[in-house]
Image: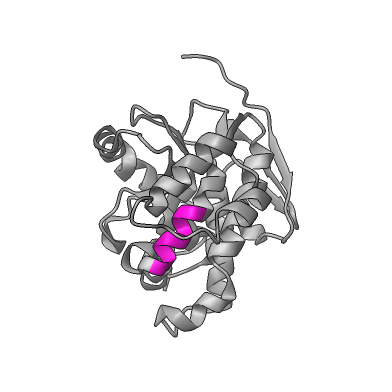
Amino acid sequence: MTTIDTAAITVVLPEAFDERWSRLPGIQVDGRRITIDPAEYFFRFESSSWLVADWELVKSQLLDVDETTESAVEQLALDFIKAHAESTSDAARVLSTAHAVYAYLFRDEHLAGLGLPQITAEHLRMLREAATLMALNKVELDGHISNVGPCWFFPAATSVVFDLDDEMGGMLDEVYHGGWFNEHRRIESIKAHAALGGRLVHGCQSVPDQTGGVVAPYGASMAAFRDDLAAFKAGWIEQVYAHRVSPAA
């Protein structure tokens, strides 16, 4: 296996994160500063490069562009990525970009339209934090999953960090991938994820399957992705749950 950089990743974000993220191995939170030890944090860490585009550019040149009969929103995003995305080995840049993406996608104004009165602004903050960390996960073009951290298993990670019971963890997961069920949010998501060099894909059917998500490059083999994911997920989900402080009520 190629040796890759496993130096500590440190980033200072605009918002303080919940310090309970430190319950998971290899991650320390001190207010807005997050430090990740890749060797401890990731289940699999084979790639230390990511594709990113400038969020300000996404905001100014893509978010307000409408699809047409000739150019679907996916094509708009793909063209933007081809023109503006670049490879980076700066994980802090990836996390900062992801935080901007998810601050936009999980903003409080969406609460009224969710149809889920039990989901609050606090839950959206949890989503922003978990999804930001999820951006370090990675899928290669051949469908091989090269980076997997605890936030791949969204309900498991959020239950450990935020002491959520299974029902609320599942509800949060529904909001996370609710773009599938709401075309307005799906279009918004496709455009925003251009900043992370791809599109958000899920391995799961819905809550009970808990197969997580990742921003994958356009053109990645989804068949190979599905098979790789099926081979490892059960054991790693179990390892995430093992860090629960106490059994959820």
Number of marks present in the image shown: 0
In this picture, residue 158 sits left or right of residue 205: right
Q: Is residue 167 above or below residue 58?
A: below
Q: Residue 18 appears in which quarter of the rendering? A: bottom right
Q: Is residue 88 magenta?
A: no
Which percent across, then down, holds residue 115?
39, 82
Left or right of 10 on screen, residue 210: left
Q: Is residue 108 in view?
A: yes
5 over 209 or under it: above or below = above
In the rendered image, residue 54, in percent from the top left (x then y), is placed at 65, 44
Quarter of the picture holding the C terminus: bottom left
Q: Which residues are magenta?
A: 184-191
Name the residue: 59% across, 63% down.
104
Type of secondary structure dominating the magenta stretch: helix
Q: 163 or 198, which is in the foreground?
A: 198
Q: Residue at x 31, y 39 (%)?
A: 229
Say whether residue 187 is magenta.
Answer: yes
Q: How is the image coloured?
A: one colour
- Percent of width and height locating residue 196: 54, 44
Foreground residue among 2 and 49: 49
Residue with the most extreme top position? 2
Please indicate whether residue 103 sits to the left or right of residue 43 in the image. right
**Whether residue 174 is visible:** no
Q: Residue at x 72, y 61 (%)?
A: 15
